[in-house]
Image: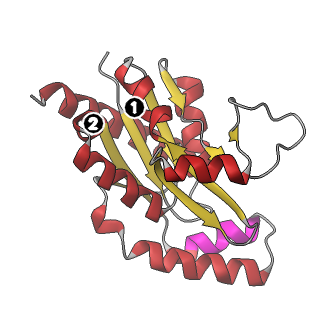
């Protein structure tokens, strides 16, 4: 089976994490990309399974070596998160399908990396999970977030929407089942495109 890399983005509350988890759980051959962080492991988290846990110094060394496809500061926590090239290219080259959810800037970094990597260019599809703004507010309110946090997330979502034209595919979010069906259809399209690529 031709492997694919699905890179998902969308506003908080769009369900992208749930979609990634379902692909890994319900579709044979799919794996979640293990990303890297400088934050400390939480109870029960295993290095190399949930994240690659690096010290700030180890992270700096990897950045200096150009080992990341993308990385960013999360200013609220003061930690850094990133995706190592080897965490993507090695499994993909071995024929394993991958899925990841990142922010819009992360997707841009993946697209830049694909310009220099025929493997990525051939097998990658970028997907934006779009939620109408009024519906997004309902979902975030339902998660019990504070009004300040909701306002911040709504502002971020409005900015993310401006980037929607840069994505290969858009899922117009309806509900969990419809969104998952849409993602499965996209997976087959990316796979067919990769098989047809010379």
Which residue lies under the disc numbered 2? 190
Main SS of the magenta part reads: helix
Can you tell which quarter of the image residue 154 is in? bottom right
Q: Camera-side residue: 148 or 197?
A: 197
Mark 1 nearby-residue class (10 Å; few <14, some 14–19, many ≥20): some
Can you tell which quarter of the image residue 128 is in? bottom left
Name the residue located 48 percent from the left edge and 37 percent from the top edge.
99
Q: What x and y, as percent, mark residue 23?
A: 52, 32
Tell me how far mark 2 sits from mark 1, CA to CA.
17 Å
Question: Can residue 172 be seen in the rendering of this structure?
Answer: no
Report the magenta residues as a range: 135-142
Left or right: 135 in relation to 44: left
Name the residue located 45 percent from the left edge and 64 percent from the top edge.
105
What numbered label is drawn on residue 47? Answer: none
Q: Is residue 51 above or below residue 173?
A: above
Labels 2 & 1 near each other (Cβ < 8 A) = no
Q: Camera-side residue: 168 or 73?
A: 73
Can you tell which quarter of the image residue 198 is in? top left
Q: What x and y, as percent, mark residue 169?
A: 31, 52
Name the residue located 55 percent from the left edge and 46 percent from the top edge.
62
């Amino acid at each position: 089976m031709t492997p694919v890399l699905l890179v998902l983005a969308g506003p908080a509350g769009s369900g992208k994490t749930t979609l990634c988890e379902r692909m890994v759980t319900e579709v044979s051959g799919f794996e979640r990309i293990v990303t890297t962080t400088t934050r400390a492991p939480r109870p029960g988290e295993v290095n190399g399974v949930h994240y690659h846990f690096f010290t700030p110094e180890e992270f700096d060394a990897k950045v200096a070596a150009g080992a990341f496809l993308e990385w960013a500061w999360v200013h609220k926590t003061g930690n850094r998160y990133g995706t190592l090239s080897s965490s993507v290219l090695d499994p993909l080259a071995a024929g394993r399908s991958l899925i990841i959810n990142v922010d819009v800037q992360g997707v841009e970094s993946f697209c830049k990396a694909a310009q220099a990597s025929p493997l990525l260019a051939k097998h990658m599809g970028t997907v934006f999970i779009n939620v109408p703004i009024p519906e997004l507010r309902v979902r975030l309110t339902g998660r019990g977030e504070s009004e300040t946090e909701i306002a911040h997330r709504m502002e971020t979502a409005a900015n993310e929407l401006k980037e929607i034209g840069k994505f290969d595919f858009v899922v117009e979010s309806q509900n969990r089942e419809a969104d998952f069906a849409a993602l499965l259809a996209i997976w087959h399209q990316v796979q067919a495109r990769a098989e047809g690529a010379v």
